[in-house]
C-alpha cells in the first residue's frame, strides 16, 4: 500500500509511523487519519513489528491538530462521520496487542493530543506543547479527547484543559500525568557542547530523541511478547468494568498464560539463573 501522508517503516522489530505533512504541521486530514488506521492494520498482521513508535515529521509538530480548512466544510452528518473515522483509527492504536509509544516531538494539539493519548505511553520532547483548543473554534474534541483525557489526568484537570482550551508545556503535561516522561535532547557539537539557535535556544536533536524512545521500547520488547499482550488486554478491558470484574479478567488471563511456552521459559530461566529466550508463543 502506498501512503501519501504518513511513512511506515519496520526495522529491528520496531515499526515507526511518521505523520508526514510538515508544511501543514502534520495536521490530520481525513486521508491522513485513514492512512493511520491502515498502517496499524498492517502492523497488527506483521510478525516482524514487535512494537510501535508514532512521531511527527520535522521538529516543530507531532500533530498540530485537525485540518481546519477541511473541518470548516463539514456539516452535521459529515462531521459525525469524521469523528467516527478518527475514533476507529485511534481505537486500533489503543487496542493493538503490541506496545505503542507516542514520541511527541512538538505541538500535540487537538487531534494530535488525541492521537498521543491513544498510544500506550507518551514521551515528550522538552519543547513539546499539549492542548485541546477545540472550544476556541466553536467545536469539541471528536477523536476521543473527552474520554481519554479524564482517564489519564482525572476529571477536574481534563475539564480545565477542555473548557479553557489552553496549551500546556511538556513539564506541566508530565506533572499532571499526561505524559510518562520528558526527554531533553539538544544537538551537541564535537566537544559535547549544546548547539543553540540565534536566540540562544537549544536546537532539538530529533534523531537522538527517536533513538532514546527506541531504546525504551526495546526494553519492553526484551520481555515476553505474550505477557506484553496480556498486560495490554487486561488494562484496556479492565477500564471498561468495575474493579471486581477487572480482577476477574486479570485472574483469567493469569491462568491462561500458564498454557504458553513463554511462561514456562520465563519461570524456568529464573530458577536456572539464566536469561530467558522468549518466542512469543
Image (cartoon, helix red, strand yellow):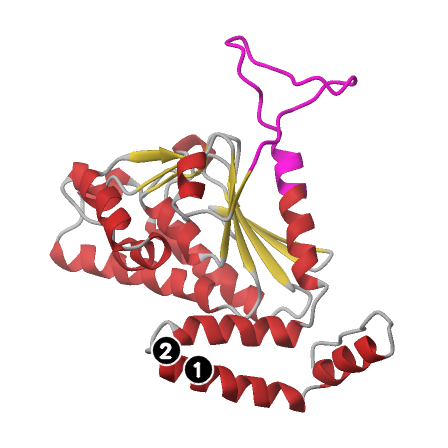
User: What is the count of numbered marks?
Assistant: 2
Residue 82 at x, y percent in the picture: 26, 56
Q: Is residue 164 above or below residue 115?
A: above
47 with respect to 125 (left or right): right
Q: Nearer the viewer, residue 48 or 157?
A: 157
Q: Secondary structure at mark 2?
A: helix
Residue 35 at x, y percent in the picture: 45, 55
Residue 118 at x, y percent in the picture: 42, 57
Q: Which residue is found at the position 65% from the left and 89% from the top?
A: 258
Magenta segment main secondary structure? loop
Graded by Cα atoms within 10 Å as few (under 14), some (14 to 19) or many (20 or more), the crowding at tag 1 reads some
Residue 195 lies in magenta, yes or no? yes
Q: Nearer the viewer, residue 105 or 2?
A: 105
Residue extending farthest to the top is 198
Q: Which residue is found at the position 39% from the left and 65% from the top?
A: 91
User: Quarter of the image holding residue 131?
Assistant: top left
163 with respect to 92 (left or right): left
Q: What residue span does the magenta drawing correspond to? A: 183-211
Residue 139 at x, y percent in the picture: 17, 46
What's the CA distance linking mark 2 and mark 1? 6 Å
185 with respect to 169 (left or right): right
Classify the position of the N terminus by image quarter. bottom right
Say the numbered circle drawn on residue 243: 2
Say the numbered circle drawn on residue 247: 1
Dots 2 and 1: beta carbons under 8 Å? yes
Classify the position of the C terminus by image quarter. bottom right
Amino acid at each position: 500500500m502506498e501512503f501519501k501522508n504518513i511513512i511506515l517503516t519496520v526495522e529491528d522489530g520496531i515499526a515507526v509511523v511518521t505523520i508526514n505533512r510538515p508544511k501543514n504541521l502534520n495536521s490530520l486530514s481525513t486521508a491522513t487519519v485513514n492512512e493511520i488506521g491502515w498502517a496499524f492494520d498492517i502492523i497488527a498482521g506483521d510478525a516482524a513489528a514487535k512494537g510501535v513508535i508514532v512521531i511527527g515529521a520535522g521538529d516543530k509538530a507531532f500533530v498540530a491538530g485537525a485540518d481546519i480548512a477541511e473541518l470548516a466544510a463539514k456539516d452535521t452528518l459529515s462531521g459525525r462521520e469524521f469523528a467516527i473515522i478518527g475514533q476507529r483509527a485511534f481505537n486500533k492504536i489503543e487496542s493493538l496487542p503490541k506496545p505503542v509509544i507516542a514520541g511527541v516531538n512538538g505541538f500535540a494539539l487537538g487531534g494530535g493530543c488525541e492521537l498521543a493519548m491513544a498510544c500506550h505511553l507518551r514521551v515528550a520532547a522538552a519543547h513539546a506543547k499539549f492542548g485541546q483548543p477545540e472550544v476556541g473554534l466553536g467545536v469539541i474534541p471528536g477523536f476521543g479527547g473527552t474520554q481519554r483525557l479524564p482517564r489519564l489526568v482525572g476529571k477536574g484537570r481534563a475539564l480545565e484543559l477542555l473548557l479553557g482550551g489552553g496549551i500546556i508545556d511538556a513539564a506541566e503535561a508530565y506533572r499532571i500525568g499526561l505524559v510518562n516522561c520528558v526527554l531533553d535532547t539538544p544537538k551537541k557539537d564535537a566537544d559535547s557542547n549544546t548547539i543553540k539557535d540565534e536566540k540562544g535556544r537549544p536546537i532539538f536533536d530529533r534523531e537522538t530523541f527517536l533513538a532514546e524512545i527506541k531504546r525504551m521500547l526495546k526494553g519492553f520488547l526484551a520481555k515476553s511478547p505474550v505477557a506484553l499482550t496480556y498486560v495490554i488486554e487486561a488494562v484496556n478491558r479492565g477500564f471498561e468494568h468495575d474493579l471486581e470484574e477487572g480482577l476477574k479478567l486479570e485472574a483469567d488471563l493469569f491462568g491462561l498464560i500458564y498454557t504458553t511456552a513463554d511462561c514456562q521459559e520465563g519461570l524456568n530461566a529464573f530458577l536456572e539463573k539464566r536469561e530467558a529466550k522468549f518466542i512469543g508463543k
